[in-house]
Amino acid sequence: MNNEDYFEDRVDNRDLFKDKVDWVLKDSIQEKNFQCGYCGKSVNSSKGITTIIHNDAFIEQHKDIVGVYICPNCNRPTFIDNVFSQTQVPLPKIDNNLQNIPLEVMEVYQEALDAYSVGAFTGTTLLCRKLLMHIAVDLGAKENESFAEYVKFFDEQHYISPRSHNWVDEIRKIGNKANHKLDMNTKEEAEKDLIFCEMILKSNYEYPNEISNKKEPNQ
């Protein structure tokens, strides 16, 4: 799809939404199961703001509704549109309950998670690229090296397992696409980057500290 078609589709969807939908505040709306993008809980909610779609045929074709749902666990709003654009904002965050991570590293990781949660997938991959550079330097790599050198560093210095070599090449390709090409990154690519970063963080910060913090049993 070229840029003209992309923006034309975006405008068409926006106009369709504007012409066919009114917001209606209700205490009880059609129930929806979803994973909250704030607290991460899988919930069922019937509280929020629903819509009226001004087209009987359209309603018949799309049994779902568009609405803002209030999470019963954390009471925060999630916008869900399964009719016009298959959208949830914010998206469920990938687990970030990591321990013993250096503050500067954790701040970049959290920013990458936040970008993912609002559907900024190219931004997520760029932040993951920056995050991996931070981690590599913290683990002993030289500053101001190329991204490819930092990825190579993880592999050669055994900061990833021998069976993860395919991951290294995949992450290098995704990082290069985000930084050097005009193509937008996909949700799947962003998720791969985040999973790889989580693996690096857990295996090199969280797990080693868990072991070292355990007290030895009395002899």
Image: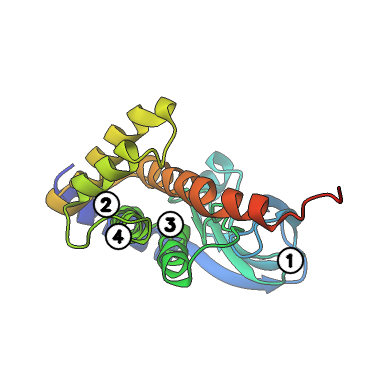
| Quadrant assignment for the N terminus | top left
Q: Earlier in the sequence, mark 3 or mark 2?
A: 2
In this rendering, position of residue 90 left or right of residue 216: left
Answer yes or no: do the residues labelled 2 and 4 have beta carbons within 8 Å?
no
Mark 3, Cα crowd under 10 Å, few <14 / some 14-19 / many 20+, is many
Q: Amino acid at mark 2?
A: Asp
Name the residue: 17% across, 56% down.
145
Read off the residue under disc 2. 9
Distance between mark 2 and mark 1 Cα atoms: 31 Å
Read off the residue under disc 1. 47
Q: Nearer the viewer, mark 4 or mark 1?
A: 4
Q: Earlier in the sequence, mark 4 or mark 3?
A: 3
Mark 4, Cα crowd under 10 Å, few <14 / some 14-19 / many 20+, is some
Q: Earlier in the sequence, mark 1 or mark 3?
A: 1
Q: Amino acid at mark 4?
A: Lys
Distance between mark 2 and mark 4 Cα atoms: 32 Å
Q: Return the residue nearer the eye: 91 or 219.
A: 219
Name the residue: 70% across, 64% down.
71
Rendered location of residue 84, percent (x, y)? 45, 51
Q: Return the residue nearer the eye: 97 or 212.
A: 212
Q: Earlier in the sequence, mark 2 or mark 1?
A: 2
Read off the residue under disc 4. 130
Q: Quadrant of residue 108?
A: bottom left
Residue found farthest to the right: 218
Rendered location of residue 68, percent (x, y)? 60, 65
Q: Amino acid at mark 3?
A: Tyr
